[in-house]
């Protein structure tokens, strides 16, 4: 990392009553870095993110772009996009929420609508519906669309793709790929295989302390897509259902399936395929860069 860090934690500690959640976390993330924040439930990941967003008072130093997120809330909100793990229980109508978030962060509601459409969500259709009444996937798509607004150069995401269908996941990963060199990303997850293809560095928390900080090779790069052709044995109904959930299409009298998998999803896909290995006769996979499909 060269120059001043975009995200900076120095000896950050946080307790709730007598329970220590963060115990002296020191961490620096540079411009354009994509970092996975991993660890078991209760490790302190979400609390660290809340401190970064200025939602919690804590001991130590927390800075984004050299300023305190609590002392400079407006400035920080304008440059940071946040996707929480659990959508807030807002009763505000969708259209009003989009306008409010855009005004708060200096964005354009039309840009949010465009981002949402790319994820398969038509905001106009749900404009008067309370946010709390949306499905889990619809809420996640809307929150991602708000976070990916133009001029966001820091993305903080807590299990961002957890509720997305495969098509929306591919679109989401594609948008991250387009912004990978201009946006600093901190992605929290309790499973490394969920985010390994999105990042080049892993920071592990356990009991409120950094226990690992290492660079990783990107086996499934953020900007790749896999074109897959799967031939199944007869009677493979369970495998057929699983491939259908990944939006694979049946060809050749239903014996062969074709589809695409986003590079960051390869470990999840291979894990699913391994469960039905006895029913798979042939697998062909071709990898290509996002947006550059072979003929």
Image (tube, rainbow, N blue to C red):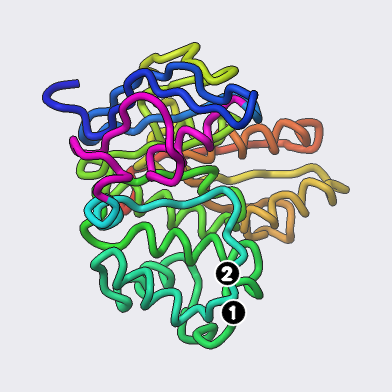
* Local secondary structure at mark 2: loop
Residue 104 magenta-highlighted: no
Q: Is there a contact, CB below 8 Å, between mark 2 and mark 1?
A: yes
The reply, left or right, for residue 12 in relation to residue 242 is left
Few, some or many C-alpha atoms within 10 Å of disc 1 (few <14, some 14-19, many ≥20)?
A: some
Task: Write the residue at 28% across / 39% down.
Answer: 184
Query: Percent from the top left, x then y, of residue 40?
Result: 63, 25
> What is the crowding at mark 2: few (fewer than 14 residues within 10 Å), some, or many (at least 20)?
few
Which residue, given by chain and number where applicable, does mark 2 sit on?
Answer: 90
Residue at 83% from the left image edge and 46% from the top image edge: 236
The tag on residue 260 is none
Q: CA distance from mark 2 to mark 1?
A: 7 Å
Q: Residue at x 34, y 39 (%)?
A: 185
Q: Is residue 53 magenta?
A: yes
Q: Is residue 77 left or right of residue 265?
A: left
* Highlighted range, magenta: 43-72
Quadrant hosting residue 271: top right
Q: Position of residue 128 (x, y in %)?
A: 53, 88
Q: Which is nearer the N-term, disc 2 or disc 1? A: 2
Percent from the top left, x then y, of residue 202? Answer: 43, 22
Q: Is residue 159 above or below residue 89?
A: above
- Residue indicated by mark 1: 130
């Amino acid at each position: 990392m060269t120059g001043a860090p975009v995200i900076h934690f120095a000896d950050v500690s946080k307790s709730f009553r007598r329970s220590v959640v963060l115990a002296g976390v020191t961490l620096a993330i540079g411009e354009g870095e994509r970092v996975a924040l991993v660890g078991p439930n209760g490790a302190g990941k979400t609390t660290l993110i809340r401190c970064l967003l200025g939602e919690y008072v804590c001991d130590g130093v927390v800075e984004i772009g050299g300023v305190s997120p609590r002392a400079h809330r407006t400035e920080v909100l304008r440059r940071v996009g946040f996707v929480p793990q659990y959508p807030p229980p807002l009763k505000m109508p969708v259209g009003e929420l989009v306008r409010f978030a855009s005004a708060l962060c200096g964005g354009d509601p039309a840009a949010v609508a465009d981002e949402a459409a790319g994820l398969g969500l038509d905001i106009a259709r749900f404009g008067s519906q309370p946010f709390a009444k949306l499905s889990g996937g619809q809420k996640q798509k809307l929150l991602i669309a708000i976070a990916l607004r133009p001029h966001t150069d820091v993305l903080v995401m807590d299990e961002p793709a957890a509720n997305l269908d495969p098509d929306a996941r591919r679109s989401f990963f594609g948008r991250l790929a387009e912004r990978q060199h201009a946006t600093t990303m901190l992605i929290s997850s309790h499973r490394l295989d969920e985010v390994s293809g999105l990042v080049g560095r892993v920071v592990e928390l356990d009991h409120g302390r950094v226990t690992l900080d290492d660079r990783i090779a990107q086996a499934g790069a953020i900007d790749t897509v896999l074109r897959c052709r799967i031939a199944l044995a007869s009677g493979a109904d369970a495998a057929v259902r699983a491939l259908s959930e990944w939006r694979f299409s049946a060809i050749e009298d239903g014996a062969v399936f074709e589809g695409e998998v986003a590079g960051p999803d390869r470990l999840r896909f291979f894990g699913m395929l391994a469960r039905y290995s006895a029913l798979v006769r042939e697998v062909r996979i071709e990898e290509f860069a996002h947006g550059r499909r072979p003929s």
